[in-house]
Image: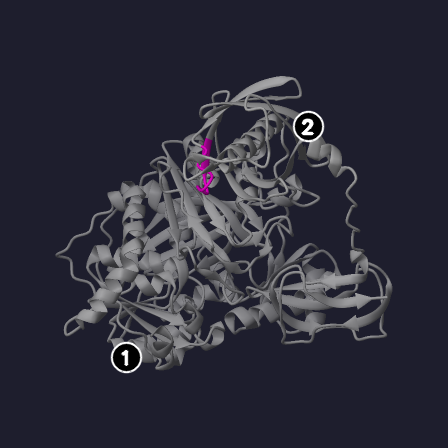
C-alpha cells in the first residue's frame, strides 16, 4: 500500500478528514496507537509543554506543512496538535514509514532518497502544498529552512513561511553580508576577510594576511558543514577544496569566506524572538562548546561561564542585530567567547535551532508556538523582564555513530531494539525514530535529542546520567558512551570547557570509560551473577527442573571471568534473587530481578544501584555488557573450561597497514590512485562522503598500489576494502 502511494507521488491520508474512509481510519488507528501513547508520555514528562499556554480561541492556520523529516518534523507536529492545526508531512520514498509520516494528518511523497531529489526538491514540495491546500510551511532546521528562494516561492503563492522574511534570510543566511551588517549594528565581530574567496590561491593569500590559524567557512552554511581550520598554506588549499565541495553538496552554494580562528574559545549562543511589530526579546543563552568536527554534541542552558553583565551585553547585541534586519521569528545569534569573556559574533541562524528545547525548559516557552503566532501576525505576549532563568537544562545529541572513531563516524542499520528513558524523572526525548526504524546513509545520523531538567545544574546532570544508562539502542553503533563520559568528567562538572574539550581530554581519541578498581569489581560480580542466573534458568523447562549439562555445586560456583587481558577467579553462590560473589578476596552482594529477557536490568551491588544492559551472550561464555555507558566484553568460563581453553589456538591478527578500508558507510567521492602508483605514508588515497561530510582516507605506509576495489560514485559499507597496497 505504501509503495503504491509513493509511486503515485502522494501517500494515503494518515487521518480521515471530511469525507475520509472508515477503512483508512481503522488502518491509521492500528498503526499509530503505540506512537500516540509514546508522544503523550513525552509531553507529560516535558516541563516546557506543561507550562506553555495554548489558547484555543486564538486562530492561526487550519493546515500546516512541515518541509522536513525526523525529530524536528515530529517536534513541530506536537505543537500543531496542541494548537489545533492539521499537519502535512513530506517524505522521501525510503521515509514512507517514518514516525513523522505516521504522526501527521496527511503525508506526501516528494521523491527518492537523495536530499536533492526530495527534501531539497522545491518543485515537488510546492506541488505537495498545492495538493494538500496547506496555508503555511514550517521548514524546521537544515534543508530549505534558510533558503531565500524557497521563501520567495512561498510568498508568490500566498503561503505563509513560518520564519523570518526573505530579506532577513538573505542578510543573515549569507555569512559575508551578515558580518558587515553586524559591524554596522555595533555587534562585536571576528577579524577576517569580508568578501567571497574565489579560489585556493586567493585563500592562501588571504590566510597569510589575516595570520594563521584561520577558519574557512561556507558562506551559506551551518551545522558545522563546509568548515575547516587551517594552520598553514597546505591545509588552506585542502580546506578550500573540501569546504567548497561540502558547501555545494549541503547548501547548493560553494562560496567561502575566511576569518581569524580564535583558539580555545567557548561557543555560546543567544536565542532571540521577534515579531512583526518591532518587538524583540533575548531568551538567555545556550552553552554549546562540546563539539566534534565543529558540530555540537552537548548543550546546556544557562552557561556556567557568563555573569549577568556579559549575558545582558550579549543579549542586547543579539536583539540589536535582529532589529537591524527587521527580524520576525525565532532565531539564534552565535558568539565565540574567549577566556576573558570577550565575545565575537559568529553567525545568525534564521531558523529554529536544534538545541532549542533547553531554552524552552528554562523559560517555559514553546518556541514553535511562538514562531507560528508571529508568522500569523500576533505580537509577542512577553516583555524582556518576563523572561526567567528557571533551573538548568542539558541536552545530549544521541547519534548513530561510533565514538571510538574520530569521536563519531556514522553508523547505519535498523533499530532492532529501541526504548527511550522516559521513566526517569525530568527527562524529555525529542526523536523521530521507533523500534524498527532505519538509519540510512542519506540523512543526518541523529537518533534523538535527550534533554534533562533540574532546579540546578547538578540535578540536571544526575538525571542525564541516569537517562543515558537507561537508554536502550540496539542495531546501530551509538555515542552513549562518549556522552556519559563527558557529562561525568571532572572538567565538565566544574564548567571548565571550550570547543577543544574533546581533543584536549582525549588526545589519543575516545577509548571508553576507564574503570576504577571498585567499578571493575562491580562489573565482574555483576557478570558472574548474570552467568549463574542464566545457568540456573537453563536447568528449568517451563518452570520444571530438568537435567543440566553442567553439574555445579548449587552453593558454590567456581568461575574464571576474563576482562581485557586479565582473568579473575570468582566464586559465586545464590540465595534467592541475591548472589554472594567473591572476587580477588573481596565478597560483594548482588541483588536484582534477573529478568534475562529484559534489555535493561537494575541491580544493586552492596547497596549501590546500577542500570546495566546485557547486549549479548553466547554458549561460549562471552558476554557484552553495557556498564557506566561503555560496552565491555567478558569471557566467563567454569574453572575446568578455563584450564582447557589454554590449549586452544589463537587467531592470526590481520596486517591492516596494507589495506585501506572504509571506516564508515558512505559514497566514494574520489579515488586518487590507480594500480601501480607509488604512494607515501599519509598520502590521500580516496574520499568518502557520509551524511554530507567528506572524509579523506590516507595510506598507512609507503608502498605500491596493488589493487583498487572502488570507484567514484559507488556506495560502500563500513569495513569494505577500498585499496590494497603491496
Residue 44 image position (x, y, % from top left): 27, 44
Coloring basis for residues: one colour
Say which quadrant the N terminus sits in. bottom left
- Tell me the magenta residue range: 594-602
Give me the residue at 45% from left, 76% from top. 112
At horizontal 68% and vertical 64% (from top left) the residue drawn is 720
Is residue 99 something one can see in this rendering? Answer: yes
Instruction: Point out the image quarter for the C terminus.
Output: bottom right
* Front disc: 1 or 2: 2
Tell me what residue is drawn at x 44 percent, y 70 percent: 94
Q: Viewer-proximal residue, 701 or 220?
A: 701
Q: Which mark is residue 568?
A: 2
Residue projecting furthest to the front: 547
- Residue 187 image point, x, y percent: 47, 53
Q: Is residue 125 visible?
A: no
Q: Position of residue 382 (x, y in %)?
A: 25, 47
Q: Residue 622 falls in which quadrant of the image?
A: top right
Which disc, if any, is residue 130? 1
Q: Is residue 465 magenta?
A: no
Label 1 CA crowd tier, 10 Å (few <14, some 14–19, many 20+): few
Q: Secondary structure at mark 2?
A: strand
Amino acid at each position: 500500500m505504501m509503495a503504491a502511494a509513493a509511486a503515485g507521488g502522494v501517500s494515503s491520508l494518515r487521518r480521515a478528514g471530511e469525507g475520509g474512509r472508515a477503512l483508512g481510519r481503522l488502518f491509521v488507528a492500528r498503526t499509530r496507537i503505540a506512537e500516540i501513547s509514546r508522544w503523550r508520555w513525552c509531553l507529560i514528562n516535558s516541563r516546557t509543554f506543561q507550562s506553555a499556554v495554548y489558547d484555543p480561541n486564538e486562530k492561526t492556520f487550519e493546515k500546516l506543512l512541515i518541509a522536513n523529516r525526523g525529530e524536528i518534523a515530529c517536534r513541530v507536529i506536537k505543537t500543531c496538535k496542541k494548537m489545533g492545526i492539521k499537519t502535512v508531512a513530506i517524505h522521501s520514498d525510503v521515509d514512507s514509514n517514518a514516525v513523522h509520516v505516521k504522526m501527521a494528518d496527511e503525508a506526501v511523497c516528494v521523491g527518492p532518497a537523495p536530499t536533492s531529489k526530495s527534501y531539497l526538491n522545491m518543485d515537488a514540495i510546492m506541488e505537495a502544498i498545492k495538493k494538500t491546500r496547506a496555508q503555511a510551511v514550517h521548514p524546521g532546521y537544515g534543508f530549505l529552512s534558510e533558503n531565500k528562494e524557497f521563501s520567495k516561492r512561498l510568498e508568490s503563492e500566498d503561503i505563509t513561511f513560518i520564519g523570518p522574511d526573505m530579506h532577513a534570510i538573505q542578510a543573515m543566511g549569507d555569512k559575508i553580508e551578515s558580518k558587515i551588517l553586524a559591524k554596522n549594528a555595533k555587534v562585536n565581530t571576528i577579524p577576517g576577510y569580508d568578501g567571497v574567496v574565489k579560489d585556493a590561491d586567493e585563500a592562501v593569500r588571504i590566510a597569510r594576511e589575516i595570520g594563521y590559524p584561520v577558519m574557512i567557512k561556507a558562506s551559506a552554511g551551518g551545522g558545522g558543514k563546509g568548515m575547516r581550520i587551517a594552520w598553514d598554506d597546505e591545509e588552506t588549499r585542502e580546506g578550500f577544496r573540501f569546504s567548497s565541495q561540502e558547501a555545494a553538496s549541503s547548501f547548493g552554494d560553494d562560496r567561502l569566506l575566511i576569518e581569524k580562528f580564535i583558539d580555545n574559545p567557548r561557543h555560546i549562543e543567544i536565542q532571540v524572538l521577534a515579531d512583526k511589530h518591532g518587538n524583540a526579546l533575548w531568551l538567555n543563552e545556550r552553552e554549546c562548546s562540546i563539539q566534534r568536527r565543529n558540530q555540537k554534541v552537548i548543550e546546556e542552558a544557562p552557561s556556567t561561564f557568563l555573569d549577568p553583565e556579559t549575558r545582558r551585553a550579549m543579549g542586547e547585541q543579539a536583539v540589536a542585530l535582529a532589529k537591524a534586519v527587521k527580524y520576525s521569528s525565532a532565531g539564534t545569534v552565535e558568539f565565540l567567547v574567549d577566556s576573558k569573556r570577550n565575545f565575537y559574533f559568529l553567525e545568525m541562524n534564521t531558523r529554529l535551532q536544534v538545541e532549542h528545547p533547553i531554552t524552552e525548559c528554562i523559560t517555559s516557552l514553546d518556541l514553535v508556538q511562538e514562531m507560528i503566532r508571529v508568522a500569523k501576525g500576533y505580537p509577542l505576549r512577553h516583555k524582556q523582564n518576563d523572561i526567567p532563568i528557571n533551573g538548568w537544562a542539558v541536552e545530549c545529541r544521541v547519534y548513530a555513530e561510533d565514538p571510538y572513531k574520530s569521536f563519531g563516524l556514522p553508523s547505519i542499520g535498523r533499530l532492532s531494539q529501541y526504548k527511550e528513558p522516559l521513566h526517569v524523572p525530568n527527562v524529555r526525548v525529542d526523536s523521530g525514530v521507533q523500534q524498527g526504524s532505519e538509519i540510512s546513509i542519506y540523512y543526518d545520523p541523529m537518533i534523538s535529542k535527550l534533554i534533562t531538567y533540574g532546579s540546578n545544574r547538578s540535578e540536571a546532570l544526575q538525571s542525564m546520567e541516569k537517562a543515558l544508562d537507561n537508554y536502550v539502542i540496539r542495531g546501530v553503533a551509538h555515542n552513549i558512551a562518549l556522552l556519559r563520559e563527558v557529562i561525568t568528567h571532572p572538567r565538565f562538572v566544574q564548567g571548565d570547557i571550550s570547543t577543544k574539550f574533546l581533543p584536549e581530554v582525549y588526545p589519543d581519541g575516545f577509548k571508553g570509560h576507564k574503570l576504577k578498581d571498585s567499578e571493575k569489581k562491580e562489573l565482574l560480580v555483576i557478570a558472574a551473577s548474570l552467568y549463574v542466573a542464566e545457568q540456573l534458568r537453563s536447568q528449568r523447562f517451563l518452570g520444571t527442573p530438568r537435567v543440566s549439562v553442567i553439574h555445579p555445586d548449587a552453593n558454590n560456583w567456581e568461575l574464571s571471568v576474563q576482562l581485557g587481558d586479565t582473568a579473575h577467579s570468582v566464586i559465586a553462590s545464590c540465595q534467592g534473587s541475591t548472589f554472594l560473589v567473591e572476587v580477588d578476596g573481596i565478597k560483594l552482594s548482588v541483588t536484582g530481578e534477573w529478568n534475562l529477557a529484559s534489555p535493561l536490568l537494575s541491580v544493586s551491588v552492596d547497596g549501590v544501584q546500577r542500570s546495566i544492559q546485557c547486549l549479548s551472550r553466547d554458549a561460549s561464555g562471552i558476554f557484552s555488557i553495557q556498564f557506566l555507558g561503555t560496552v565491555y566484553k567478558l569471557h566467563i568460563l567454569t574453572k575446568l573450561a578455563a584450564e582447557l581453553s589454554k590449549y586452544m589456538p589463537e587467531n592470526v591478527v590481520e596486517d591492516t597497514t596494507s589495506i585501506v578500508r572504509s571506516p564508515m558507510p558512505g559514497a566514494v567521492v574520489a579515488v586518487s590512485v590507480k594500480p601501480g602508483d607509488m604512494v607515501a605514508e599519509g598520502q590521500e588515497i580516496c574520499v568518502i562522503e557520509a551524511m554530507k561530510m567528506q572524509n579523506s582516507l590516507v595510506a598507512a605506509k609507503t608502498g605500491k598500489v596493488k589493487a583498487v576495489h572502488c570507484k567514484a560514485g559507488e556506495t560502500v559499507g563500513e569495513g569494505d576494502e577500498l585499496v590494497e597496497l603491496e
